[in-house]
Image (tube, grey):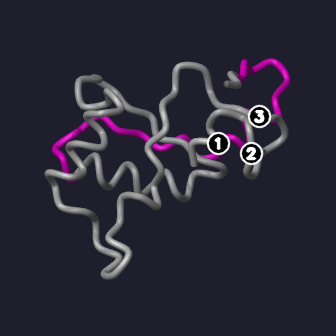
Amino acid sequence: MPEQHAGKGGVHYGRAGRIPGSCNVASRGLLDPKTNALLPIDELRRRFGDAGLLGEERVIAYCGGGIAASLTALALAALGKDDVEVYIHSLQEWANDPDMPMEVG
């Protein structure tokens, strides 16, 4: 959710905001709501391309606790990305560590 990623609404996990340098591609937007299947490859390519992720060598997907990020990693794998990881503890870990930076806005 864009407002959650910006730190301006939605659930937060200790501190509002996002991991610096991250971008927002909502996992729930990667599925066809009628079939629960991944969107067509061309649409996935557009969404991740618009976010600038297809040119990245390595992508680390994260969310609140690592569950939704698994779908993001699956969608990227369907696009042929082979260096994708899921940050297992995601914001539940990052946002609760005061030494880790957070971006808002």
* Sequence-first disc among 1 and 3: 1
Residue located beneath label 2 in the image: 9
Q: Residue 101, image x and y in percent?
A: 72, 18
- Look at the numbered disc 1 and give the secondary structure of its residue: helix
What label does residue 29 carry, if any?
A: none
- Residue at the outermost bottom position: 34
Amino acid on which disc 3 is placed: Ala
What label does residue 3 carry, if any?
A: 1
Residue at left offset 54%, top offset 40%:
87
* Sequence-first disc among 2 and 1: 1
Mark 1: few/some/many CA within 10 Å (<14, 14-19, 20+): some
Task: Nearest to the eye among marks 1 and 3: give it.
Answer: 1
Amino acid on which disc 2 is placed: Gly
Residue located beneath label 3 in the image: 95
- Look at the numbered disc 3 and give the secondary structure of its residue: loop
Q: Which stretch appears magenta?
A: 78-102
Q: CA distance from mark 1 to mark 3?
A: 16 Å
Mark 3: few/some/many CA within 10 Å (<14, 14-19, 20+): many
Residue at left offset 30%, top offset 43%:
47
Q: CA distance from mark 2 to mark 3?
A: 15 Å
* Sequence-first disc among 2 and 3: 2
Residue at left offset 40%, top offset 51%:
72
Magenta part, dominant SS: loop
| Left or right: residue 104 compared with residue 99 | left
